[in-house]
Image: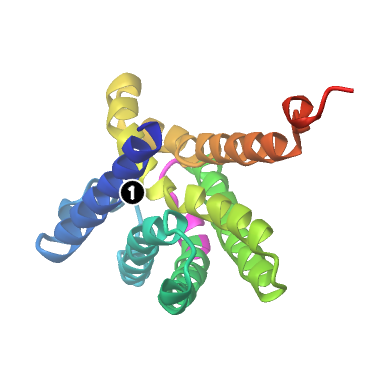
Amino acid sequence: MGKKINRALVFFLAFAIAGYALVQYSLFKASDAGLVAAKLQEPDFQLTPWVYVLYIHIVTAVLALVIGPFQIFQKPSKPRGRLHKRLGYVYVLSIAVSGIVGIYLSFFATGGWISGLGFFTLDVLWVATTWIGLRKIMAKDAKAHREWMLRSYALTFAGVTLRIWLAPLVMLLGDFESGYLVVAWLCWVPNLLVIEYIIRRKASKRLLPVDDSHSRPNL
């Protein structure tokens, strides 16, 4: 029951944030978004080409965000294998593009070098974990592939946790810049720690000795 709730929650949050991002940046002016509005208040800030790079980052990140749950919660089977592979390549390509342009955006992050370093580290790890996951499946190591893709999606999910944390942090700290500085790290570090705990817990369960005393005949 708990697994079904977690699965439903991941799907709901991923699609809710994806929908919010698409509505915010396609139906409304980009300047109405909190992030863009904050950037426009910075002295000497040039909206272009920054905003176009931001659009590329958002579209590709949203694509990875909505593909991820179908990949990580999909039970392996031959009929689904081809779809899984195709969606996997789209997922990897989306992250490659989004992560690379995200590195560019990190140099202009609101909050200065501390938040910039947070997002820079996130983007590097995001691309790296995804690439390692791809390399593992190319080497036919399905177990390692799944583990690295779980790490990858934990970082993809930073797009969700950023928006969950940002509003409370802004209210708590009193201004957008302070909240954004903290969320640059808080949006992904706990995600990675939680998924690492889950991966290691599953690995330790597999290593537990099997108690076969009940199956042995009494001598």
Image quarter in which the N terminus is found? top left
Q: Which residue extends farthest right? A: 219
Is 109 a magenta residue?
A: yes
At a point 37% along the width and 38% down the height, the residue shown is: 6
Q: Which residue extends farthest left? A: 27
Q: Which residue extends farthest front? A: 219
Image quarter in which the C terminus is found? top right
Q: Provide the residue designation for mark 1.
A: 42
- Residues 80 and 68: in front is 80
Q: Is residue 164 visible?
A: yes
Q: Is residue 38 visible?
A: no
Q: Please, what secondary structure does the residue beneath circle 1 have?
A: loop
Q: Which residues are magenta?
A: 103-111
- What amino acid is at disc 1? Glu
Using residue 145 as the reference point, say whether residue 123 is left or right of it: left
- Res 98 quadrant in image: bottom left
Q: Residues within 10 Å of mark 1 (few under 14, many from 20)?
A: few
- Is residue 11 depicted above or below 142 in this figure? above
Is 168 a magenta residue?
A: no
At a point 34% along the width and 66% down the height, the residue shown is: 63
Residue 19 image point, x, y percent: 19, 56
- Residues 181 and 135: in front is 135
